Image (cartoon, rainbow, N blue to C red):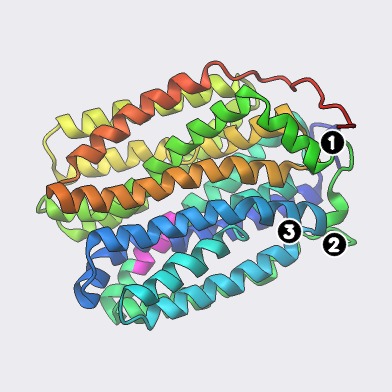
Amino acid sequence: MSASSPAILSRRAWIMIAASAAIVTLAMGVRQSFGLYLTPMTMELGVSRQTFGFILALQNLLFGVVQPFVGAYADKHGAGRVLIIGTLVYIAGMVISAFASGALGLGIGFGALVGMAMSGVTFVVTMGVVGKMVPAHKRTLAFGIITAGGSLGQFFVVPLAQGLIDAYGWRSSLNLLAVMLLLIVPLAFGLMGRRGDAAVAPHEGLPLNLALKQAFADKSWWLLGSGYFVCGFHVAFVGIHFPAYISDQGLSPSIGATGLALIGLFNILGSWMWGAWGGKYSKKHLLAALYALRGVAIIIFLLVPLSPLSALVFASTFGFLWLGTVPLTNGLVAQIYGLRNLTALTGIVYLGHQIGAFLGAWLGGLLFDMTGSYTLVWYISIALGFIAALSNLPIRQTPPESVPQTT
């Protein structure tokens, strides 16, 4: 089944969508729990919030830097082996972190290994396969379902992680979550075609080198990446520092954990709805609206007196806006630049997302240590939301002129 196939999705396509969603549920669910480890890790290991934030910032940066290469490999050789290798590296990073005695061990485990592993087990790789199996008008909906998987994982895995930390301590909890990640390996076979998953990749379109030349010369490419940068900043800052912010304000740590779970719960609905809307309406206008609404949500959160209710309402609202950017952005990449190099191209755009995530994670800790408050980072997040909304409006949603085949 290709992008020109009928509207009804094949059984094979649904199997791949389900496997992708389950993989993202596990991989992203575990990763979204990392903010819960900030307080126990920093207290026991004697590292600052700035150091912890920098380690997770390094994780996000490596995730983005490695992603284009992993994406290009998956386009050529298939996502199955990429997922299996990524899972094993992910587990190694979790185990090393569990036995860490200081910042170096956390840097190697949580930072380097988990960061590189994430490039092989999340949205970009799985959507690259599914995007080549569904018709164009169903693509963002399929992407939304997969993205919702990450949120389902956040809803279930974050409270599970908190429970494991409370019952067994943070070290044992990391090892138990690492064991759970082994489930990704059998799920990876659901993304393989009859001759390996590389067999489903279409061959129409420009070779990768010319596709990159075409994209890099296109203003819309850079505008799309700049918006994704802001998404990464928001997600990393809120995902990592929100529980600590809640605790700093005198609320129970359980409110922070519940808030992260609600972000995941409401993003299930949000990812599906933004993905469904992307098949009917202008994706760039939807992206602009989503980023602007994030800015509004933060403003209201800061203006309303903080309470358990206001914290959970904010988490629910932000959850609806959390990863709706993923199906819309990936759908735009496919719409504008085609399917042949979809995984590699979305991987490069995702690098912008992860550079933003690096800054969101690191600056959150740095500015807190400098000022004793997260207030400045919240203000930066508001400004970036409205900047991202404006940057998406000029994007051209049709393919650019072809790059000549000869240089």
Disc number at residue 79?
A: 3
Q: Image quadrant of residue 9?
A: top right
Name the amino acid type tagged 1.
Answer: Leu
Instruction: Tell me the residue at 60%/74% (across/down).
Output: 88
Q: Foreground residue, 403 or 305? A: 403
> Residue 220's spot in the image, x, y percent?
61, 24
Name the amino acid type tagged 2.
Answer: Gly
Is 375 covered by the magenta stretch?
Answer: no
Q: Which SS class for mark 3?
A: helix
Query: Do residues under tags 3 and 1 come within 8 Å of each other at their CB atoms?
Result: no
Task: Tell me how far mark 2 sits from mark 3, CA to CA.
Answer: 9 Å
Label 2 neighbour load within 10 Å: few <14, some 14-19, many 20+: some
Q: Which SS class for mark 1?
A: loop
Instruction: Tell me the residue at 24%/52% (across/down).
Output: 366
Left or right relative to 145: residue 95: left
Pair 3/1: label in front? 1
Residue at image mark 2: 196
Instruction: Tell me the residue at 39%/59% (across/down).
Output: 56
Residue at image mark 1: 206
Name the amino acid type tagged 3.
Answer: Ala
Query: Do residues under tags 2 and 3 come within 8 Å of each other at their CB atoms?
Result: no
Q: Which SS class for mark 2?
A: loop
For the view shown, which residue lies furthest in the front direction? 407
Q: Foreground residue, 223 or 392? A: 223
* 365 versus 141 height, above or below: below
> Residue 396's spot in the image, x, y percent?
64, 18
Give the main secondary structure, helix, strand or loop, of the magenta stretch: helix
Left or right relative to 194: residue 341: left
Magenta region, residue range: 154-161
